[in-house]
Amino acid sequence: MEINYQETSKDLLKRIDIHEKYGARNIDKWNVEVLDPQPGYKILDVGCGAGKQCFLYSDYTKGKADITGGDFSEELLEKARAAKIERGDKNVNFQFLDFNKPFAFPDNTFDFVSSAFAIYYAADLQFTFSEAHRVIKPGGSLFVTGPLPENKQMFYEIIKEATNQAIPPMPGSSRFKGDIFKTISSIFAKTELLTFENPLTFPEVAPFIDYVRASLSEDRKLWTSMFNGKEEYEAMIGKIEQVATRWFERDGKLVMTKVVGGILATK
Ligand SMILES: C[S@@+](CC[C@H](N)C(=O)[O-])C[C@H]1O[C@@H](n2cnc3c(N)ncnc32)[C@H](O)[C@@H]1O
């Protein structure tokens, strides 16, 4: 089955905002600690969305790295380009890139290629990671982050209790340690798995429900099996809110831990 992972920028930016507000740790900091981008580097971020990682690398290198962000969503590319103009980053460029198609770059171009919560949706892993390998310089790296199966356990448990249905975890999470790690390590010279844990503590129920709503477009195909149309959707959200409120009254807070894996590979 073809799954459409097209994000709306509103949902993606809402989740990023919630991570920043309620998370104990900063995933951006982890990202640059692992990659340590240097001035003069050529960098490609695949599935760049609104440009979060690209701007992070630009800030870290004080505008002295040559950074390309690629995504297949024109809506998100527009957001990224608007942010670039606002920030005045001349060294960052955004272009259309579909990671299921050949990458429009010569061999051995980039010091590193990164992809945050995106490339693991690839239809043909062997093809996509071979393309990433091809455009990385010898000795350069690939860094792919995504959810591990332990990710957001509370989110899944509350929804299961509210709907009496088990939501299948995001396909990316079950593939990450398995097929994706295996594929990357078969192509790259050296591959390791790193882990990042970030507990999000919600001081009330409302921001958790905002998070549930903002996850909808990401989980779209998985969720539509649970409701039919807007009315059923709102009824389901109502039930989720009731269960979340019970948990909140019992525990005094709601803690949802993001468990992120990072596959770091060297060409
Ligand atoms: C969860 S978002 C992550 C965005 C960004 N990396 C971040 O961390 O904010 C997933 C991204 O993957 C992009 N995406 C999904 N399928 C794609 C494809 N076939 N080619 C390129 N980008 C794709 C989506 O448009 C979206 O921007």
Image (tube, rainbow, N blue to C red):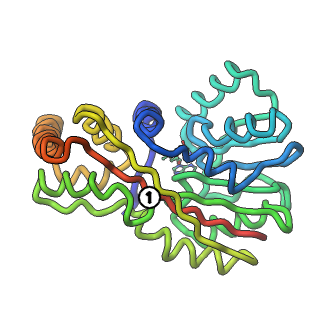
Q: Residue at x 18, y 42 (%)?
A: 248
Residue extending farthest right = 40
**Residue type highlighted by circle 1:** Val
- Whether residue 121 sits left or right of residue 104 in the image: it is left
Image quarter of the N terminus? bottom left
At horizontal 15% and vertical 60% (from top left) the residue drawn is 165
Which one is nearer the viewer's eye here, 17 or 8?
17
Residue located at (73% from left, 49% from top): 44
Give the labeled residue for mark 1.
259
Position of residue 33 in the picture relative to residue 218 (left or right): right
Q: Residue at x 40, y 37 (%)?
A: 22
Secondary structure at badge 1 equals: strand
User: Could you tell me residue 86's position as x and y percent?
Assistant: 67, 19
Q: Is mark 1 within 8 Å of ligand 1?
A: no
- Residue found farthest to the top: 86
Q: Is residue 239 visible?
A: no
Question: From the viewer's perspective, is 80 left or right of 249?
Answer: right
Q: Is residue 11 left or right of residue 250?
A: right
Camera sees residue 54: yes
Give percent across and percent down for residue 112.
Answer: 76, 56
The image quadrant that residue 124 belongs to is bottom right
Closer to the camera, 63 or 47? 63
Q: Residues within 10 Å of mark 1 (few under 14, many from 20)?
A: some
- Please count the marks in the image: 1
* The one of 140 and 259 positioned closer to us in this rendering: 259
Which quarter of the rendered picture does the C terminus lie within? bottom right
How far across and down, in percent of the image, does residue 190 sit?
72, 76
